[in-house]
Amino acid sequence: MPRCREPVLSQVLTVAQMRAAEEDLIAAGSTVDALMQLAGRGAGEWVRRIAGGGSVTVLCGPGNNGGDGWVIAEYLREHGNAVQVVQAREPVTDAARNAKALYRGAVVSAGSVTAGDVFVDCLFGSGLTRALPDDLLALLCDLAALHRHRIAIDLPSGIESDSGAALNEGLPEWSLTVALGAWKHAHFAMPACSKMGAVRLVDIGVAALPGAARVLAKPKLEAPAADAHKYRRGMLGIVAGEMPGAALLAATAALRAGAGYVKLAAQAAPLVVPPELVVTGDAAGMLADARTSALLVGPGLGRSDEASRLLAAALHAGRPTVVDADALVLLRPAMLSGAQCILTPHEGEMSALERAFGLSGAGLRRDRALALAEVSGAVVVLKGPDTLIAAPGGETVLAPRASSWLSVAGTGDVLAGAIASRLATHCQDLEQALRAAEEGLWLHGEAARLCGPAFTAGELAHAVQAALKACHGGGYEGTS
Ligand SMILES: NC(=O)C1=CN([C@@H]2O[C@H](COP(=O)(O)OP(=O)(O)OC[C@H]3O[C@@H](n4cnc5c(N)ncnc54)[C@H](OP(=O)(O)O)[C@@H]3O)[C@@H](O)[C@H]2O)[C@@H](O)CC1
Ligand SMILES: Nc1ncnc2c1ncn2[C@@H]1O[C@H](COP(=O)(O)OP(=O)(O)O)[C@@H](O)[C@H]1O
Ligand SMILES: [K+]
């Protein structure tokens, strides 16, 4: 039974889901050959944009990824590029054989290829099942080394689609990877995503697949309602601990991510406090205040008995709560009753949580995050170069690659502050935790992009405002 025909470009598919999508398209009247023409010509257009009028070498493997290669080669030939195909293996599928038969250009031996402009990798795509044999790895690397630009079609050969694992050592790096039909998990998972260069997607009409992950999207944010006031916009309470600097960083970001009021509860007031931040020594009062719409606990909390007590008190308050940093190490399952939480672990904190919640810690990052979300009832933001969000019920959101300049102390505190601020603004609806996590994560990535190289966590926190501006749908027009 064909599914809804509306194409969806934001979904991220496993190999099995991609096969199901292909079957749906065929059931709806398409053919493998037609899909290959659509995909190959779409990819060919990307190659043409990079190549300009330059020369192109296409390496074709035995499967349908190789079939795409023959289509790309013919497309470029028709558009006047000098094209040569190196056939690594004879085509083994009907569609690949048919695509080869339609190609009217040169087929050359690998040894005769001289330096050229663009190399296109159509050796293997999502059908790769094991490491490349030595002869194919050498062929791939040698041809890649001879060309100025390298473009991988669907996936770089040697990369496992569902996990993003590199099945060989010494694989080439790519300037562009053109995904066909839908994103695959490897496009967002380390180490694969760090080798792909820019990534682009060719639409072949794939419709929504149930249970598919999706890509983190730019949020659409509105100005506060005309009758908004600071409490209605959301009051965020931040519980500080031994090192108030981390909580201050979170507060600096939170002040710029939409909350109307940000309050910091600290035993000892930090030495430097921005004037717009309210600091109170009365944590209990802040937790009891009915106007406190969301909480953040963890940055700089410490791991003392007092820190545990503060964490338990914060979670006992029953507000939507972001649990970050030290609080993730102190967290125990029994503390989580009632409050809707967002957990924001990096890999080390994730391991601690898995121990605390009796999880094995085995498997892919997305499966581990989903397992934690399921057992804890919390939204999980698993941080790293390939950050992802998992929600109870199975929703998974994958972040595009963010700036590697984020690898500096304090940027996690900024993320927690941004997410908590979004959580405070959505406090009316407890179902909004996933949305808040997505918005905060997007703002964080965009702030990093806007900062450029070598920023501090403080500069990143300030840039959250510019990031928010970039996704603002308006609402306040003023007069002119
Ligand atoms: N789905 C769609 O809608 C569309 C898909 N399209 C395209 O199809 C691609 C998937 O095609 P595919 O399934 O034929 O897989 P592909 O990667 O070409 O190779 C599989 C072949 O390689 C072999 N093989 C595997 N590993 C190997 C190794 N290490 N060393 C040596 N051999 C190895 C394997 O054989 P076996 O494992 O049985 O030995 C099999 O013969 C996809 O990435 C996209 O480009 C588009 O046309 C648009 C529509
Ligand atoms: N190499 C990288 N590429 C992209 N993002 C990164 C990289 N390294 C770290 N990050 C991001 O920076 C943040 C670091 O957070 P965290 O590890 O908690 O650091 P800290 O505790 O110092 O604040 C996370 O959002 C993480 O996803
Ligand atoms: K490929």
Image (spheres, grey):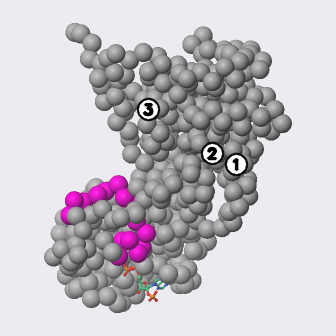
Q: Which residue corresponds to mark 1?
A: 334
The answer to whether marks 2 and 3 mark residues whose Cβ atoms lie closer than 8 Å is no
- The label shown at residue 428 is 3
Magenta stretch contains residue 10? yes
Question: Is 88 situated left or right of 240 in this image?
Answer: left
Residue at the (55%, 80%) spot, across then down? 131
Residue at the (50%, 81%) spot, across then down? 129
The answer to whether marks 3 and 1 mark residues whose Cβ atoms lie closer than 8 Å is no
**What kind of element bears circle 1?**
helix
| The furthest residue to the left | 29
Q: Would you say the beta carbon of the disc 3 residue lies within 8 angstroms of ligand 2?
A: no
**What kind of element bears circle 3?**
loop
What is the magenta range?
Answer: 5-19
- The label shown at residue 345 is none
Nearer the observer, 221 or 225: 225
Question: Is 229 situated left or right of 402 in this image?
Answer: left
- Amino acid found under the numbered disc labelled 1: Ala
Image quadrant occupied by the C terminus: top left
Q: Would you say the beta carbon of the disc 2 residue lies within 8 angstroms of ligand 2?
A: no
Q: Earlier in the sequence, mark 3 or mark 1?
A: 1
Q: Would you say the beta carbon of the disc 1 residue lies within 8 angstroms of ligand 2?
A: no
Q: Which residue corresponds to mark 2?
A: 337
Q: Is residue 442 above or below residue 98?
A: above
- Amino acid found under the numbered disc labelled 2: Ser
The answer to whether marks 1 and 2 mark residues whose Cβ atoms lie closer than 8 Å is yes
- In x, y percent, where is residue 399? 48, 50
Residue at the (47%, 45%) spot, across then down? 434
